[in-house]
Amino acid sequence: MWLLPFFKTIFSSLGKKPSTYAFPYAPMQKDPLVRGRVDIDIDACIFCNICARRCPADAIIVSKERRELAIARFQCIVCAACVEACPKKCIVMHPQLDAVSDVVSIDTLVAKAQSHTKETVTADA
Ligand code: SF4
Ligand code: SF4
């Protein structure tokens, strides 16, 4: 008798499309609600440090002297608090999912006015 709900679920699901998708055998489908990852237009940044102060995960370090902003990718909880707080709107959530092998642990972005570099520190560094 206790199996009845089990079989009811099975039979009601027959003929329906699966609720999941077959990644990695099928291409990954991006949900519009996925926040993805933080993207920064470093040349628009004024290094006010507001994003770093709002970040609940302490994932952002801003250096006004060096005109650079570093984000710890594995520390970021993708809450978008920095995006909401930025007065210059130069931080956005990019709806892109990176392969884990492509994610760097710390992304350091330096504004062009001083130098034109984007340094990265790999996860195993
Ligand atoms: S809040 Fe915006 S302008 Fe201020 S330091 Fe962060 S990214 Fe730059
Ligand atoms: S999305 Fe949230 S956790 Fe990630 S850097 Fe911005 S404020 Fe910090």
Image (spheres, rainbow, N blue to C red):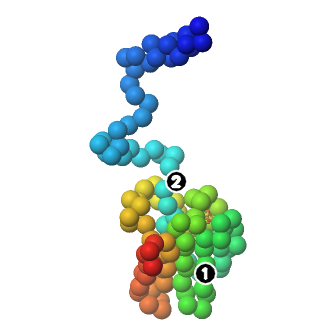
Describe residue 47's horizontal placement relative to residue 105 as left or right: right
Disc 1: residue Cβ within 8 A of ligand 1's nearest atom: yes
- The circle on residue 35 is 2
Which of the 4 image quarters holds residue 20?
A: top left
> What's the amino acid at mark 2?
Arg
Residue 54 coordinates in the image, percent (x, y):
69, 68
Q: Is residue 10 above or below residue 110?
A: above
Q: Secondary structure at mark 1?
A: strand
Q: Can residue 90 be seen here?
A: no
Tell me which label, 1 or 2, sits earlier in the chain: 2
Image height check: is 76 above or below 47? Answer: above
Residue 39, compared with residue 7, is above or below; it is below
- Image x and y of residue 3, in percent: 55, 13
User: Does the image show residue 16?
Assistant: yes
Disc 2 residue lies near ligand 2 with CB under 8 A = yes
Mark 2, Cα crowd under 10 Å, few <14 / some 14-19 / many 20+, is some
